[in-house]
Amino acid sequence: MTALSVEGVSKSFGGLRALSDVTFTVAEGETVGIMGANGAGKTTLFSLIAGHGRPTEGDIRLGERSLLGLSPDRICRLGIARTFQIVKPFGGLTVLDNVVVAALYGNADRPSQRDAEARGLAALTAVGLADRADGLAETLTLSGQKRLEVARAIATGARFLLLDEVMAGLTPPEVAEMLGLLDAVRRRHRLTLMVIEHVMKALMQLSDRILVLHHGELIATGAPAEIARDPTVLRVYYGEGA
Amino acid sequence: MDVLLSGQLLFAALITGALYALIALGLNLVYGTMRLLNVAHGDLVMIGAYVAFWGLTLFGLSPVVGLVLAAAAGALLGWLTYLGLFRRLLASPQLMRRLEGNSLLLFFGISVILQNLASLAFTASARGYQFMDQVYRFGDVALTGNRIFVLVVAVAICAAVYLLLRFHVFGLAIKALIERRDAALIVGVDIDRVQLAAICLGFAIAAIAGVLVSTTEQISPFMGFPFTISAFVVIILGGLGNISAGLVAGLLLGVLEVYGVALTSAAYRSVLIYGVFIAILLVRPQGLLGRGSVVR
Amino acid sequence: MIRSLALPILFGLAGLVLPFTGSSYLIGVGFALCCSIALVQSWTVLSAMTGYVSLGHAVFYGLGAYVVALSWGALPMPVGLLLAGGVAGVFALLVGMPVLRVRGPYFVILTFGLAELVKYLVIILESELGSFSRLMFGAPDLGVLYAIAFALAAIATAGALLIRRSRLGRGLLALRENEEAAETVGVPVVRLKLVAFALSAVIPGVVGGLAAMRTTYFEPMQAFDPTVSFTIVTMAVVGGSDDARGPLLGAAFFTILSEVLWARLPQVYMVVLGLLLILFVLFIPRGLAGIFAGRPGKAA
């Protein structure tokens, strides 16, 4: 079943065309990886889906419902949560309060504070931050803050997560840990994921399918193994000589 | 209608505009180089005005000499506040996080202190003096000498500072700091010295403007605030930290105010200024924000 | 929890006992203190919880005073006061939409400009109406005014305490930390900011009306005096605004200082105010309450 459909989406900033005529669908339960060099339009795509900015052309739908013109908080309550490439923790709040807010406001069923606290703790446990619950979020390491981003997205009760480079800047053991954690979380909550990642191996391992963006255009789609052999991808991604 | 087309009104607008451009120039230097929101700027205008007043009444010094004295007083105050307060503020990562807000609170404190110290020392009553009040006629335009003095000095100082920023090494360093703070650091600009120079220059300009104001208007310890507001309108209109656009915006506000008051009445002056101020802030919050959030 | 309630309870008990002293001087001081507490607590609902620092709360205070002055004699006193709060709240809702789009220091100077604009508009309106200062005959005596002010201070303090722990408060604190992130976890930031703005305006409106009754006249320059806004911010900075204790300490500190200095040496009082503001911003950013609370800990 189709969870999300992106139909002919273009986005221009002034004269700059960040995305042009991008079309794809994501099925429920699927994990879709997004590849592309810096400036290929990956984060722009996430922003548009999450409601930060409106496509210049095209439509984005969750199930049958168009998301165009909805505010980000509305889209979150409909079940789409994103993380930020540059982490944005609520630095002055405790780690627990970070996820409790997400549970309180992100869930469409308006949980009580006590309930939200329980859901928040569960999300922290899922990413292995439960023991840091009472510390201030700004005191976490980068790896901790990346995990907090994921926990916050989970705590909103969203079934559809947009993960923007949650492994960038992590050490190899931390990447392995994050991979294991994401895999466990998506199984337990039966999540649909879209993942932007520069760590190729991780992306290949995690994704069912991969989209390749290049200068704002979708140039290839396919299973990780196919993408790894795709001549177009090899040319633009690894340079003309490859 | 005739009044609106007269050269008299045009000159009034030019004089007010040149004065606004001058005052805003000082504010822009301080904001541009350090991101400090100096809400005490108008109070420096007040200090300059009192320097000229006392120079003349106590020692018989002409306001022309007063210009130099006021500039020195302004620079001294800049030096003191930079060493006493802002160097500390700019050096503390914790306070830097909310630099603009904190600087605003600090300057608010300074503003209240200056106003009330002036009121304690000089009493709150308004004062004035006579200077170059003979009338000159140019065609159908009649101007008192003091207003010509204001126009000439304001234009001269604006031009001098503009040229300084454009061609002198030190001016270039200030410009570099305004435009690319991080890059300026890398290429070896002595930021501390440039910041000190910028704040001294900015304060001195405000004090000079105060001397000009005192030649045509009554002065009082609480005269500064409207100038602070006008200066903020100008630099927001021209773009924060954008020196040359600020000069144009100053003239624009002068025209707007003089013609606006001529069309309505003097009672609407404040409403007009605050109205423009609020309108600009509301219309361009993203633009303003974009600049503000680039530098942390 | 117990510790953070001790101070409010202490203040409350002192406030209840005060009328029995029978000293109109003390009750007058108590009235001023209660008004300040009510103002600063209300201010924190917006400015401490969302980070949108208002330097224009005089506008709500002034509007409240104006509403009470206009309705004086035409409406019963309690109705006039409620109306004052209502008008202040509605005004906040109306202007909040555009004003709250502006962030950071620009919001600060915008609120200030807005308060000044309204002041000059009221001055023009009053001169068009041909009235320059409205006298209010037959204002209630000090005892009654004190009782109302005490109730307002209590409501504002309890409100600030409760909001901090509520769903609303958690949303506000999150958007203070990062608006974009708050939005993506479902916090309706635009609506919450507006609610906070309106909530923080209502009680200052009533306090303004009350203050007009105390002076028995309304005059725009005085009712919309920017010093009101400035004093609120200074009390909050010096007292601290991380929890409900700060405003109590800040208001008490400045009310005592003002009793000692204001009547005799108003300029000296203002200079001290300025110096303290500078001192606390630079060296004690968490305020008096921060000194008592010890190390920086949980914000909520």
Image (spheres, rainbow, N blue to C red):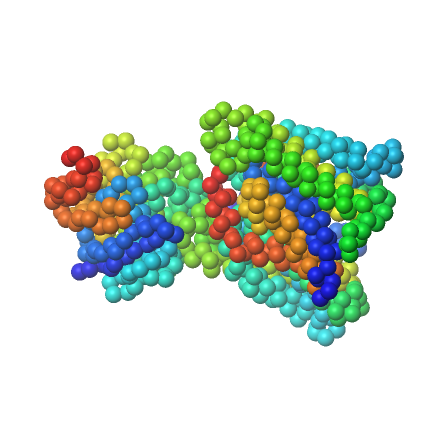
Q: Is residue C223 visible?
A: no
- Is C241 or A3 nearer to us in this picture? A3
Within the image, what quadrant is residue C282 found in? top right
Identify which residue is drawn at 84% across, 49% down: B135
Please indicate whether residue C211 sits to the left or right of residue A75 in the image: right
In the image, is B177 to the left or to the right of B253?
Answer: left
Q: Is residue A176 visible in this depiction of the protein?
A: yes
Total marks shown come to 0
| Residue occupying image coordinates x 36% and y 39% | A145
Q: Position of residue A174 (x, y in %)?
A: 27, 34
Residue shown at 73% from the left, 59% from the top:
B6
Q: Is residue A130 above or below residue C71?
A: above
Asked whether, in this view, residue C223 is left or right of residue B96, the answer is right
Residue C130 spot, x, y in % from top left? 78, 70
> Which residue occupies the foreground of this view, C238 or C5?
C238
Which of the 4 image quarters holds residue B130?
A: top right
Task: Give the answer, above or below, for where C262 lies relative to B57.
Answer: below
Question: What's the residue at 24%, 62% (across, down)?
Answer: A63
Give the residue furthest to the bottom. Answer: C74
